[in-house]
């Protein structure tokens, strides 16, 4: 089962009070049900179908008809269809199914907002498995005003949710790994959150290690390139003229560079300071190698 499927299974098993259930059902049915003389709710998730069946039975005292069918276009998944025939007017009014934006009592406080977002995600949400190459979570809606309403609800929790229109659908999405983790925490999906954060931390650590290794390799390459250039300048002077053209200290440094061709400037300064007991800094070496370079360029 996909990460999204596992997450929705976990969400469908949470224990809710009556008000939380109403908020969650409001979002779930609004985004997954067809409302008319009857209410037809369809889902591929058996756990969600069972949850909706029990919640309608407990709150409204009705028993929906259940039908199980194969998915369309030879889809291997089953479709679970709940058909509600009784108390339609009460359910539609109570859950605000006939309104673009639900009434205030559906999202009256933080607990109810979180329940509403949970129901919305179970209806039309998806999130990439954190093991994959990119982080992405999205919720699909069919109404622009409703999409903006959901974006506002999510950004109440600093999730930095953004929207896009795709094939006549309006999408609210998150792409930041930390924000997706915050959204999972907001929905109270404890097990999925632990899994997600474990993978995310591992990936972040691995990426950081790779960046450090790349940085270290780049520094090594730079040291070697600089040293080879310095050696080349010194050998050019020896070949075309003489190192005696250099002052005494610069000549000594040139001889040390030929002796320690792979050493960095810092390492070379430490070696010279130790062996000659005449301290020279990395900056001092740089200026003397600049003199050598200038002389080599004049000779060329």
Image: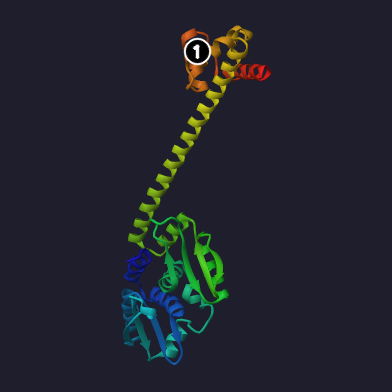
Residue at x 57% of width, y 74% of height? 144
Camera-side residue of 146 and 169: 169
- Residue 264 percent across, percent down from the top left: 50, 23
Q: In this view, does 285 lie to the left or right of 54?
A: right
Residue 183 versus residue 222 in the image, above or below: below
- Residue 143 percent across, percent down from the top left: 55, 77
- Residue 230 percent across, percent down from the top left: 56, 21
Q: Mark 1 points at which residue?
A: 272
Q: In this view, does 194 lie to the left or right of 210?
A: left
For residue 51, which quarter of the picture? bottom left
Q: How many marks?
A: 1
Residue 200 versus residue 55 in the image, above or below: above
Q: In this view, does 18 lie to the left or right of 140?
A: left
Point out the image quarter for the C terminus: top right
Residue at x 64% of width, y 18% of height? 296
Q: Residues within 10 Å of mark 1 (few under 14, many from 20)?
A: some
Point out the image quarter for the N terminus: bottom left
Camera-side residue of 281 and 247: 247
Instruction: In the displayed orientation, state which residue is furthest to the front.
Output: 240
Residue 300 versus residue 160 in the image, above or below: above
Residue at x 37% of width, y 76% of height? 18
Instruction: In the displayed orientation, state which residue is furthest to the right.
Output: 298
- Residue 64 percent across, percent down from the top left: 33, 87
Secondary element under disc 1, as helix, strand or loop, is helix
Is residue 255 visible from the viewing direction of this image? yes
Is residue 120 visible from the viewing direction of this image? no
How is the model colour-coded? Answer: rainbow
Camera-side residue of 76 and 211: 76
Residue at x 42% of width, y 47% of height? 204
Residue 134 versus residue 237 in the image, above or below: below
């Amino acid at each position: 089962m996909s990460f999204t499927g596992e997450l929705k299974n976990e969400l469908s098993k949470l224990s809710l009070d009556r008000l939380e259930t109403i908020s969650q059902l409001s979002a779930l049915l609004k985004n997954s049900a067809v409302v008319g003389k009857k209410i037809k709710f369809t889902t591929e998730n058996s756990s969600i179908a069972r949850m909706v069946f029990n919640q309608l039975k407990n709150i409204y005292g009705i028993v929906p008809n259940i039908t199980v069918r194969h998915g369309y276009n030879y889809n291997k998944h089953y479709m679970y269809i709940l058909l509600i025939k009784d108390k339609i007017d009460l359910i539609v009014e109570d859950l605000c199914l006939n309104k673009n934006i639900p009434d205030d009592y559906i999202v009256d406080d933080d607990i109810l907002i979180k329940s509403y977002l949970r129901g919305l995600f179970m209806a039309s949400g998806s999130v990439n498995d954190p093991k994959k190459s990119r982080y992405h979570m999205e919720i699909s809606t069919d109404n622009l005003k409703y999409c903006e309403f959901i974006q506002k609800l999510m950004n109440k929790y600093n999730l930095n949710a953004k929207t896009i229109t795709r094939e006549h659908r309006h999408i609210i999405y998150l792409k930041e790994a930390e924000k997706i983790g915050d959204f999972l925490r907001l929905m109270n999906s404890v097990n999925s959150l632990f899994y997600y954060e474990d993978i995310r931390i591992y990936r972040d650590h691995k990426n950081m290690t790779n960046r450090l290794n790349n940085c270290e390799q780049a520094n090594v390459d730079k040291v070697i390139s600089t040293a080879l250039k310095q050696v080349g300048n010194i050998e050019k002077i020896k070949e075309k003229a003489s190192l005696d053209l250099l002052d005494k200290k610069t000549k000594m440094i040139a001889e040390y560079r030929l002796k320690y061709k792979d050493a960095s400037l810092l390492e070379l300064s430490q070696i010279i300071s130790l062996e000659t007991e005449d301290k020279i800094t990395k900056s001092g070496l740089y200026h003397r190698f600049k003199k050598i370079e200038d002389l080599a360029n004049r000779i060329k």
